[in-house]
Image (spheres, helix red, strand yellow):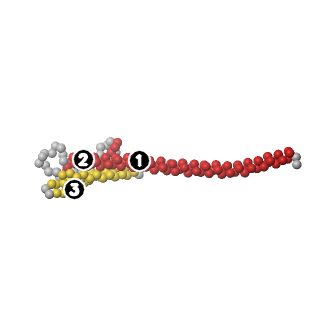
Amino acid sequence: MSPNLFSLSRSAYRQCAAHRQGGSALIIGIFVITVMFLLAAALINIVEDADTGLTQEVWGTRALAAANSGADAALAQLFPLNAPANVTATCTSVANAWTPPNVVGFHACSVSLSCTSYAVGTVTQFRINSKAICESGDTRVSRQVEVEARG
């Protein structure tokens, strides 16, 4: 056997082994790309869920502020500042709804009010219920505040 023939067979063997490894590198590449795609898809879902949660939280805070403001407005109707001392407070002076001002924090919100009165001994007590609903697109959030006062 000549040394040339031995070296040719060795180089032919190396080429054949490199050819077999090229196929496995392709499979590894496809696997890595697939794993990266799945990680990116999971990250997109996590960010989307966080965005939805933040939107719900912001609209919930707006609804709570609107419900508190509605309860304040109902109390102001029930016990007006300039009322004479001999005027008795009644639930008939409280409106069924309060329209929030047209400002950024209250836009797309509506507030409904209810007032009930009951006697405890000689004292009349009032329960004011204020429910605010704020909505935008698919997001609809409501908050409810209950206030008790006595006259």
What residue is at 23 percent from the left and 49 percent from the top? 74
Q: Residues within 10 Å of mark 1 (few under 14, many from 20)?
A: few
| Callout 2: SS | helix
Res. 121 image quadrant: bottom left
C-alpha gap between disc 2 and disc 3: 15 Å
Q: Residue furthest left?
A: 86
Task: Say which amino acid is labelled 2.
Answer: Ala
The numbered disc on residue 54 is 1
Task: Say which amino acid is labelled 1.
Answer: Leu
| Callout 1: SS | helix
What residue is at 24 percent from the left and 51 percent from the top? 147
What residue is at 47 percent from the left and 47 percent from the top? 47
The numbered disc on residue 70 is none
Side of 136 where 40 appears, left or right: right
Task: Say which amino acid is labelled 3.
Answer: Thr
Expressed as whole percent of the image width and height from the top left, the position of residue 114 reads 25, 54
| Callout 3: SS | strand
Residue carrying label 3: 116
C-alpha gap between disc 1 and disc 2: 29 Å
Expressed as whole percent of the image width and height from the top left, the position of residue 150 reads 18, 52
Specify which label sits upstream in the sequence, 3 or 1: 1
Specify which label sits upstream in the sequence, 1 or 2: 1
Specify which label sits upstream in the sequence, 2 or 3: 2
The numbered disc on residue 73 is 2
Side of 4 where 91 appears, left or right: left
Q: Residues within 10 Å of mark 2 (few under 14, many from 20)?
A: many
What residue is at 76 percent from the left and 47 percent from the top? 14
Expressed as whole percent of the image width and height from the top left, the position of residue 111 reads 29, 50
C-alpha gap between disc 3 and disc 1: 36 Å
- Count the numbered circles shown: 3
